[in-house]
Image (cartoon, grey):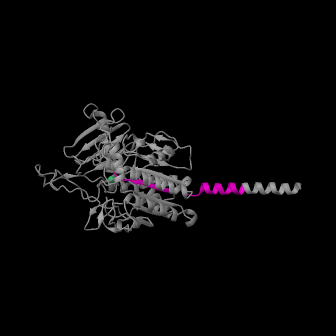
Amino acid sequence: MQQDMFKLFSAGVLASVLLGACSTQKQESKPNVVFILVDDLGWTDLSVMGSRFYQTPNVDKLADRGTLFTNAYASCTVCSPTRASIMTGKYPATINCTDWIEGHKMPKAKLKVPEWTMYMDTAEFTLAEAFRDNGYNTGHIGKWHLGEDSLFWPENQGFDVNVGGWAKGSPHRNKKLGSNGYFAPFGNPRLTDQPDDHYLTERLANEACDYITQNHPDKTGKPFFLNFWLYSVHTPLQAKDDKIAKYNALVDSSYYQKNPVYAAMVEHMDDAVGKVISQLKKDGLVDNTIIVFTSDNGGLIGRGKRKVTNIHPLRNGKGHMYEGGVRVPLIIVDPRDRSLNGKSDEPVIACDFYPTLVDMAQLEIPDQVNASFDGLSLQPLLKGEKELSREALYWHYPHYHTEGARPYSAVRKGDWKLIRFFEDDHYELYNLKEDISESRDMAAIQPEKREELKQMLFNWYEKVGAQMPAANPNYDPENWKKR
Ligand SMILES: [Ca+2]
């Protein structure tokens, strides 16, 4: 009897040891990653970031589970450069991919823009290739916008699966081509139209859920890296009627943000995020899936009567070098470590994601790739460190934008930001801690700080080989805006 009890006891010990071993093994298994990139989402376009009008309960919940960054930046004030920066870990200026593809052509403007690279070179060892070479399944769902030729599309840049990623940067409306923007038919060469299609953001969320289920590590024996890069909330402004009606009833003249259609699009985006999180829960993956949620540039203000969003208290919006054009929401969730820091005020930028994910998923990458990063791993901030050992962040946009921006560069060091405007080579200096709205130009008041940052910017041009705008022999001051 005693012997039997002993056997039973030993079996129990053995079972718990085995169970322990199993759970350790499970803990040590590679995490899945879902990288959610929203298009043109402004810094204050979420409830958790202070919007009084938009409702984003699902994204807000992500912030509760992860680290919310208050000083996160896109690598550029427009789409494509930030996307290339995420995929390479480099500044757009390093790879000469400095404008949205194909950019606004203004042949009579004061400056001639450089011959920049209108694609992400396939010679780059992308974030997706890093995951793939470390035994991951890799999927891209949604907007890509990194080259006109299919040679540069996700399936040729490290992704096993590409749903919806191609040349275009927004859902286009062209009845002749069989496309109706966010409403079906979508006319997207990497997204087969289906009879029950209705709204693009919903279709892409369903695709993401299918991807997660089909690529469940228990089925495939591999973890997955999923780029869920939404076309939302980029124009054209289109949403379902019931959502628009909801926000028509909620809009208040005291709000900075007032466009009910845009509000509805933000909610469609939030629904999509909620759907993907639910799928991860249903499939038992939510506790081993890292989630990154961010935007590729600041919110679009829009012109005249076509006002889109408002990023108060930040100045201006998409296309511009003021904070509204480049500061973005960022949440990183690592459910494997509940002790992670809930908030970080350290300035961070989109080229940090590649080294961060290499760290978090413990990927092995070639030394020369590691050495080529302009970004830094954010892992120390997630673990509770207050600062990174980084001197400054840089931006370079030697281009014109229809939102009114003209060629510029910028550097942020600590609380100070210097913007250089190329047309007249003037500089503006702001203290972002004291003046987040960039309303008091300190360039003349703080000449030492101005010169220090200017010198840093010039050194950085050299380091990354930044392409410069030049005097335009065809400059026509009367018609410079003509395209
Ligand atoms: Ca964008």
Q: Residue at x 37, y 65 (%)?
A: 153
Residue drawn at point x = 26 percent, y = 43 percent: 420
User: Residue 215, image x and y in percent?
Assistant: 52, 64
Please state which of residues 95 and 198 is positioned toward the viewer in this rendering: 198
Which residue is more in the foreground, 267 or 204? 267
Q: How many marks?
A: 0
User: In the figure, 260 relative to 148: above or below?
Assistant: above
User: Horizontal and vertical percent for residue 107?
Assistant: 16, 56
Q: Give the quarter of the figure containing the N terminus.
A: bottom right
Does the segment drawn in magenta span residue 277? Answer: no
**Does residue 75 appear in the picture of this structure?**
no
Note whether residue 257 is visible. yes
Left or right? Give the position of 32 relative to 111.
right
Looking at the rendering, which quadrant does residue 24 occupy? bottom right
> Which residues are the magenta region?
17-40
Outermost residue, right side? 1
Where residue 8 appears, x then y in whole percent?
81, 56
Indicate the position of residue 432 as horizontal and vertical percent values: 34, 36
Query: Residue lying farthest top?
Result: 445
Looking at the picture, tell me which residue is in the foreground, 300 or 58.
Answer: 58
Q: Is residue 34 magenta?
A: yes
Quadrant in which residue 425 is drawn = top left
Of the 4 image quadrants, the one containing the C terminus is bottom left
